[in-house]
Image (cartoon, helix red, strand yellow):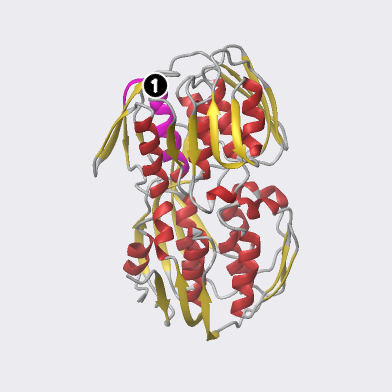
Amino acid sequence: MKNYIKISKTISHFNKSIKIEGDKSLSIRWALLASQAKGKSICLNLLKSEDVINTLKCLKKLGTKIKLSKKKCEIIGNGLNGFRYDKNIILNAGNSGTLGRLILGLLVHAKKKVLIKGDKSLSKRDFKRITTPLEKFGAKFQTNLGKLPIIIKGTGYPKPIKYNELRGSAQCKSSVMLAALNTKGSTIIKAKKSRNHSEILFKYLKLPIKIIKKKNYDFIKINGGKNIKPFNYNIPSDISSSAFFIVLTALSKNSKLIIKNVNINPSRVGILKILRMMGVKIIEKNKKIYKGEKIADLFIKSNNSFKAINCPVEFNSSAIDEFLLIFLVAAKAKGVSYFKNLAELNQKESPRLLWGSKILNKMGIKTIVTKDSIKIYGNPNLKIKRQIIIDKFLKDHRVFMSSIVAALTFGGKWKIYDKDSIKTSFPTFITIIKSLGAKLT
């Protein structure tokens, strides 16, 4: 079977309501924390993507009992530091940086060596940013120049640490938090603002965590050693996955869309704030709080004109996974949009800042890109008539899906490779986009 999608027609107007799969960040965190609880935890609407399935496979190899069905997932945890496994096991994190980095935090106490590997894309990403603080707990690592594959051997006598997280990486922060769970004493983290799903889950589980919020940093104090009770969770819809349909609707003609039960955690809604600055019409309705997370239905309407912006850098961390889509809106805005301090984009599954520029250039949009910034010279009248091929992007699921959105809204004849890449985060993407009337071959 050929692993590409062809698109030669823009999407017709639509007025529909959809539901997106469960949030990937919460799905992985639920599984990891449930593995540390003593007893059975149950999850509904768990995202069944490759990243989450690989998380379950890794936990099974570590001796955790798991039962997965269409309706729910059950995990029977053995308690803190309760992993039971043979010598020299190999865990495959696949494409998931969240899994690869966070599970290392749970293994700082592992008495037997564990090897963690990943796919070609994940093996290019920096893991030294997390092995360095975990070494301070007492864990020992053998790495490939700071990259995967990594061998970890934990310690029976972990020491609490003080850690400065300077990048705004929720993965690094969360890994240290998980390592602190079973470390006696107080681990103190000074963390640049980033996603706070881990902190919310810790609070919901009544773990001993204290957070002092400052303008640019959070100070997090965790006293380790408290047992985790089993817990049930109904995962809300993923805003990062919803973003593709928000931008698709905004750039389409005479269209309206409702996306149900979306997680609008304040550390994740940079995409909404930036798009509203650019003139995208988004309304939040039926707001509620679910176990500390903010949930809402999102109403989106298409628009004929967009504003160029100088994007405030304080939105970067809360929109880090959505910038490829934001760049598409900037391509249709009147004027020059400027985005800076985005070096972290090139630490993702592919160098996304560079790929964002490449896609726009193929579309006929002028850009000026540096190692951490991009200027986008928008064209409100852009209509593509040429053929465009998107390939060799390290199978980055967000490059693939963003290219689909571009093809369906700007025109042209597109051939977009590596359609299987969506299995890592959003396996039903093609099904949902077809339900809105998109013609894909």
Specify whether 177 is left or right of 285.
Answer: right
| Residue 327 belongs to magenta span | no
Specify whether 19 is left or right of 144.
Answer: left
Specify whether 298 is left or right of 46.
Answer: right
Q: Quadrant of the N terminus?
A: bottom left
Is residue 289 something that shows in the picture? Answer: no
x and y, in percent, of residue 368 in the image: 74, 70
As helix, strand or loop, the secondary structure at mark 1 comes to: loop
The number of numbered badges drawn on the structure is 1
What is the three-letter code of the residue carrying label 1?
Answer: Ala
x and y, in percent, of residue 232 in the image: 34, 29
Image: magenta residue range: 25-40
Q: Quadrant of the C terminus?
A: bottom left
**Residue in the picture at 45% in, 58% down:** 299
Looking at the image, which is closer to me, 282 or 123?
123
* Residue located farthest toward the bottom when viewing the structure as drawn: 385
x and y, in percent, of residue 370 in the image: 75, 62
Q: Is residue 388 placed above or below 48 in the rendered structure? A: below
Looking at the image, which is closer to me, 180 or 223?
180
Is residue 195 something that shows in the picture? Answer: yes
**Residue in the picture at 47% in, 67% down:** 248
Looking at the image, which is closer to me, 235 or 181?
181
Looking at the image, which is closer to me, 395 or 15?
395
**Residue in the picture at 45% in, 19% down:** 81
User: What residue would you read off at disc 1?
Assistant: 37
| Residue 31 belongs to magenta span | yes
The 10 Å Cα crowd at callout 1, few under 14, some 14 to 19, many 20 or more, is many
